[in-house]
Amino acid sequence: MKKLLLTAVTLSLVFATSCDVKQTQETVLPDVDVTVEEGQLPSFDVEWADIDVGMKTTTVTVPKVVVVMEEVEVEVPYIDVDMPDEFGEKEERTILVEAEVDGVEHNIKIKKIYASKNNLIVVSELVKGSTTLGDKKLRVSDQITLNAPDLNVKHYIVGERPNRLYNGAYKYYSSMSALKSKVDGYKEIYSK
């Protein structure tokens, strides 16, 4: 078998080296008409970090103020309002006004209540005291009890607005005369 293979390779070499090759014609490539169309860039889906936002419990040091609450009997103003039946049944509820102060002690009192149809305007007065609070803050309040149908209640406070976030719930005015236009057309039903 080895002899046969060696003979075939030898004969191939003899034929290849005994040939004389001459070019008889030039090469001509075919004409190509190319139309270019709009391409497209590749797109990729990239997976990034998975983020979860939530809450966790941790221990921090915070100042603690202890407030002792006790029940005491005090007299509070009571207003009983009789209105036409179209306004519904009467219900007893508390009208409360509060302010959060710091720096200097303050006092707040409900001074007047005005009514028109099913609207009430509660006018309170915030007066600055002389006792300093140091770095403490204090919440002051006043209240009355109202026995009437469900009414819309607006609060106006006469006095300087304390610089605490909580005090944004009410509108503040510099004097009683500054809010006179707000109560035009209303009837005064309470005065202290």
Image (tube, helix red, strand yellow):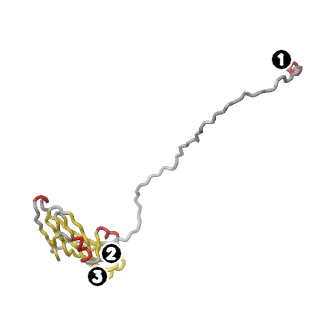
Say which amino acid is labelled 2: Pro
Determine the secondary structure under disc 1. helix
Give the quarter of the image for residue 55.
bottom left
| Furthest residue toward bottom | 130
| Residue that label 3 marks | 129
Residue 91 at x, y = what percent? Answer: 14, 62
Name the residue rendered at 23%, 67% in the picture: 154
Name the residue rendered at 21%, 63% in the picture: 152
Q: Is residue 80 left or right of residue 65?
A: left
> Crowding near pointer 1: few (<14 within 10 Å), some, many (20+)?
few
Q: Is residue 9 left or right of residue 57?
A: right
Between the residue at mark 3 and the residue at mark 2, the CA separation in whole angstroms equals 13 Å
- Above or below, 50 against 40 in this view is below
Residue 66 at x, y = what percent? Answer: 30, 72
Residue 162 is labelled as 2
Determine the secondary structure under disc 2. loop
Label 1 vs 3, first from the N-terminus: 1
